[in-house]
């Protein structure tokens, strides 16, 4: 008889890194063949803008899901509850409430943490520190990387497993021709200040003073920055001849954009383990990103890309000029990134690691 696992996870919509990973897990043939799975989908936000916002409807859903959780534990009798725990913002207090229920129901729990900042938050607030310790006590934790695993060290003394995020390898063959007359820098993310959209544009303005043989493509869904704001900023920086702004792309359209780019730029100010970086690595793109979260484990300086400090447009422009000037370096870094993706960041590897963790915990 297979062991029973209850998945208590955020699922799309909205579509973002952790919800897409959760969707892969609950639909995984490998995991479903190894364990008997039941899923309690948690859907509180309707859009990216709605994440972290309080509403009466969300409060009502919180209690509705609590009753569903109690009912499902009694019916399904899981050996393990897998909980994609929200450790930041107002959602944290909601999930501590669910942790209380799980403890009262006396079920074994493993938390999957998709963000960073627990150590910092626990130092700011004695209440949060106590709640972290309460929630995590006598449980297990999955972290996205070895370095992020250290983030819980001050509030957790149990076993912390590392499972890197992964993505499904693209099956369709794309022509990866990076030998364009003008190097194309690609920004592919939600239009958010925290993702460094304005840092990217500032760096392009600096680069333009040194060379003209480049184009940049901004692709993303408006979040706390509108498309109109981006277009206006481009005009202010006199970048209209160099920057193309496009709406969010998904599936084949996104892969087509990745296949045509020359350098992927992700100047994020706040990230844990951005999936878009491993998408770029799959398409043999050298990556320029920031020293943030697990990114220094994903992007090795001088090997498959470059790292710069956060919010530093000048440093970003220097690295962009370096790669724009050296086709062979771009090619070598891109090939190194593809090899690293294949060896570490596919969905198959991720799912097998998760299965091993479940077996260990159970």
Image: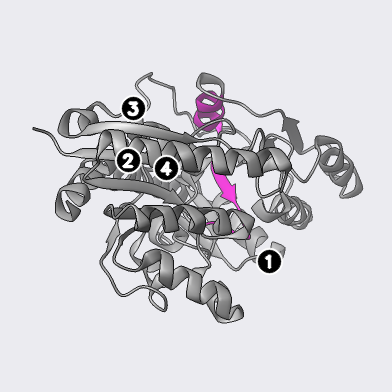
Dot 1, crowdedness within 10 Å: few (<14), some or many (≥20)?
some
Of mark 1 and mark 3, the one earlier in the sequence is 3
Q: Give the percent coordinates (x, y) of residue 33.
A: 17, 28
User: 62 or 143, which lies in front?
Assistant: 62
| Relative to 103, 317 lies left or right | right
| Relative to 34, 337 lies left or right | right
Q: In 3D space, how far apart are the residues under numbered discs 4 and 3 (Cα atoms)?
A: 24 Å
Residue position marked by numbered label 3 in the rendering: 27
Residue position marked by numbered label 1 in the rendering: 312
Asked if 7 appears above or below 326 in the picture, the reply is above
Of mark 4 and mark 3, the one earlier in the sequence is 3
Asked if the stretch drawn in magenta spans residue 258, the answer is yes
Residue in the picture at 46% in, 52% down: 98
In the picture, the quarter occupied by the N terminus is top left
Mark 2 vs mark 3, foreground winner is 2
Quarter residue 157 falls in: bottom left
- Element under label 3? helix
| Relative to 89, 204 lies left or right | right
User: 289 or 38, which lies in front?
Assistant: 38
Q: In 3D space, how far apart are the residues under numbered discs 2 and 3 (Cα atoms)?
A: 21 Å
Dot 2, crowdedness within 10 Å: few (<14), some or many (≥20)?
some
Residue position marked by numbered label 4 in the rendering: 281
Residue in the picture at 59% in, 38% down: 61
Q: Give the percent coordinates (x, y) of residue 356.
A: 17, 48
Q: In 3D space, how far apart are the residues under numbered discs 1 and 4 (Cα atoms)?
A: 23 Å
Answer whether residue 119 is visible to the viewer in this image: no
| Relative to 150, 108 lies left or right | left
Residue position marked by numbered label 2 in the rendering: 73
Asked if the stretch drawn in magenta spans residue 318, the answer is no
């Amino acid at each position: 008889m297979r062991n029973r696992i209850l998945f208590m996870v955020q699922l799309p919509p909205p579509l973002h890194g952790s919800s897409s990973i959760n969707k892969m897990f609950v639909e995984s043939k490998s995991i479903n063949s190894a364990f008997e799975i039941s899923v309690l989908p948690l859907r509180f936000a309707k859009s990216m803008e709605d994440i972290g916002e309080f509403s009466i409807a969300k409060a009502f859903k919180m209690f509705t899901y609590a009753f569903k959780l109690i009912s499902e534990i009694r019916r399904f009798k899981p050996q393990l509850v897998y909980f994609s725990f929200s450790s930041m913002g107002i959602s944290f207090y909601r999930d501590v409430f669910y942790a209380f229920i799980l403890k009262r129901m006396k079920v074994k729990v493993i938390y999957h943490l998709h963000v960073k900042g627990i150590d910092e938050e626990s130092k700011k607030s004695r209440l949060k520190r106590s709640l972290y310790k309460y929630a995590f006590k006598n449980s297990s934790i999955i972290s996205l990387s070895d370095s992020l695993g250290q983030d819980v060290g001050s509030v957790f003394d149990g076993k912390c497993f590392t499972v890197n995020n992964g993505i499904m390898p693209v099956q369709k063959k794309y022509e990866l021709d990076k030998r364009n007359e003008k190097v194309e820098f690609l920004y592919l993310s939600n239009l958010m200040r925290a993702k460094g959209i304005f840092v990217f544009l500032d760096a392009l303005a600096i680069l333009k003073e040194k060379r003209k043989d480049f184009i940049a493509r901004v692709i993303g869904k408006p979040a706390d920055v509108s498309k109109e704001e981006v277009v206006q900023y481009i005009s202010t920086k006199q970048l209209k001849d160099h920057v193309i702004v496009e709406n969010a792309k998904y599936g084949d359209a996104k892969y087509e954009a990745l296949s045509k780019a020359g350098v992927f730029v992700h100047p994020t100010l706040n990230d844990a383990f951005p999936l878009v970086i491993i998408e770029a690595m799959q398409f043999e793109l050298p990556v320029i990103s920031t020293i943030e979260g697990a990114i220094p484990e994903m992007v090795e300086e001088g090997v498959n890309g470059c790292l710069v400090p956060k919010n530093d447009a000048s440093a970003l422009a220097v690295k962009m000029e370096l790669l724009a000037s050296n086709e062979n370096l771009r090619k070598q870094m891109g090939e190194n990134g593809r090899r690293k993706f294949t060896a570490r960041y596919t969905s198959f590897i991720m799912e097998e690691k998760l299965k091993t963790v479940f077996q260990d915990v159970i």
